[in-house]
Amino acid sequence: MKVISYNIQYGRGQDGVIDLVRSCNAIRGADIICLQEVDQHWQRSGDLDQAAEISGLLPSYYAVYGSSFDVDASAPAAHGAITNRRRRHGNMILSRWPILSMRTLNLPKQDYAEKFNMHMTCIEAVIDTGSAALRIYNYHGGYLEAAERLMQVEYFADVFARSPGEGGAWSGESNIGGDDWSNRRPAPPLPASAIFCGDFNARPDSEEYRFMIESTGLEDCWALVDPANRMTSTGYRESADGIEDYGKIDHIMVTPDLSAAVQRVAIDHAANGSDHKPVEAVLRLA
């Protein structure tokens, strides 16, 4: 099973051109895909619903989208009718298996007054691969300061720890007063086994990264199978001095029960459809 995490920067490549086809070509063929920075109805990205566009470009995948940043982008017409639209910036999970349930986790936000900041997102999906039911987390941490990222990690660690005990999207008896709330479907699980992906905006030597590992018990796939390259940069940007690298800020982690299943990790350095590079992990599930 190949898992890819990719911050697509709404499809804007290192050449400044927005090209979702190029972004999708870099991830095509993976089994589970976690994308960050997917726009809906932004002027900068052509006012498109990029989640719908990506689903159209990758039609063989099940897909969900979630955003904690959600503001008005509606358009009133002259005759008074309202075209209701929302401007969102969030995360997307695509899977070759059905996505049994999904929820959006709103990460804590600080007000920096002099700097643009926005609500960041983590989405949780439950996928049954046939051999295993897995929680998939697609996380995008704040870019400004470690203090905010630590708040976000603390929040996530709490949700992560208590989620299996809460049960899935629905649980328990489905018949309430004679009404069937199950829609004649079995209750979706919320398994203990999990894969965490995303743009953490923090390197492995950061305090917030260490807190994530220590508080959740998650294990970094690079530390498991390629520790010599666990600091290899995954983000790049142009500066006055040329190309500047962000460091290793994109990560894939797994719960300890999946650590032995991790076979290989890689960074696609050839992909140029964003200021990040896609990262991938290959797992062999029993």
Image (cartoon, rainbow, N blue to C red):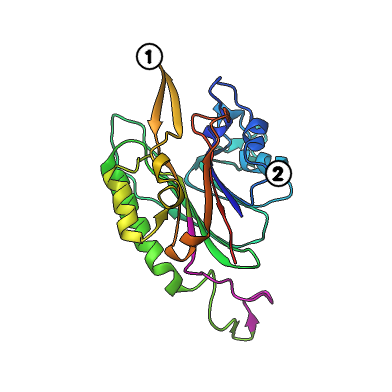
**Residue 6 lies in magenta, yes or no?**
no
Dot 1 corresponds to which residue? 241
Dot 2 corresponds to which residue? 58
Residue 219 in the image: above or below residue 235? below
Identify residue type, mark 2: Leu
Which residue does the image show at 33% across and 47% down from the upper left? 209
Residue 1 in the image: above or below residue 82? below
Looking at the rendering, in which quadrant would you find the C terminus?
bottom right
Range of residues picked out in magenta? 179-195
Residue 181, numbered circle? none
Residue 16 in the image: above or below residue 195? above
Callout in the foreground (1, 2): 1
Which residue does the image show at 52% across and 33% down from the upper left? 9
Which residue does the image show at 40% across and 37% down from the upper left? 248
Q: State the SS at label 2.
A: loop
Residue 34 in the image: above or below residue 143? below
Q: Is residue 87 visible?
A: yes
Could you tell me residue 225's position as x and y percent? 46, 50
Q: Quadrant of residue 256?
A: bottom left
